[in-house]
Amino acid sequence: MLTMEQVYHIRYMKKFEGKSLRKIADIIGHDFETVKKYVEKDNFNI
């Protein structure tokens, strides 16, 4: 599980920097599927 700060950083890199999910995964050192899950997730209250 990632911290909300990490999630915000992932989403920022995708939305504002235009980085690919694979590039983000390489940068932060987490699995591609983990990055994909947090980029696509809309509701973090669950």
Image: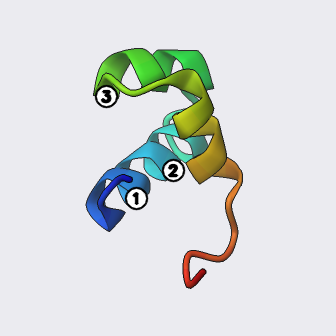
Name the front one of labels 2 and 3. 3
Q: Given contact means CB atoms under 8 Å apart, are the residues at marks 3 and 1 in contact? A: no
Residue in the picture at 51% in, 50% down: 11
* Residue at 68% over, 60% down: 41
- Secondary structure under badge 2? helix
Q: Please report contact status of discs 1 and 2: CB closer than 8 Å, yes or no.
A: yes
* Disc number for residue 28: 3
Which tag, 2 or 3, sits closer to the chain's start? 2
| Residue type highlighted by circle 1 | Tyr
Query: Which amino acid is tagged 3?
Result: Ile
Quarter of image, res 25 = top left
Label 1 neighbourhood size at 10 Å, few (<14), some (14-19), many (20+)?
Answer: some
Please say whether residue 32 is visible from this viewpoint: yes
Badge 3, how many Cα within 10 Å: few under 14, some, many 20+? few
Q: Residue 11: give its label.
A: 2
Asked which secondary structure carries label 1, the reply is helix
Task: Tell me the quarter of the image containing the C terminus.
Answer: bottom right
Q: Is residue 4 above or below residue 1?
A: below
Number of residues whose C-alpha sits closer than 10 Å to that of mark 2, classed few (under 14), some (14–19) or many (20 or more): many
The residue closer to the viewer here, 3 or 39, is 3
Residue visible at 64% across and 37% down in the picture:
36
Residue at the spot of label 1: 8
x, y (%) of residue 7? Answer: 41, 55
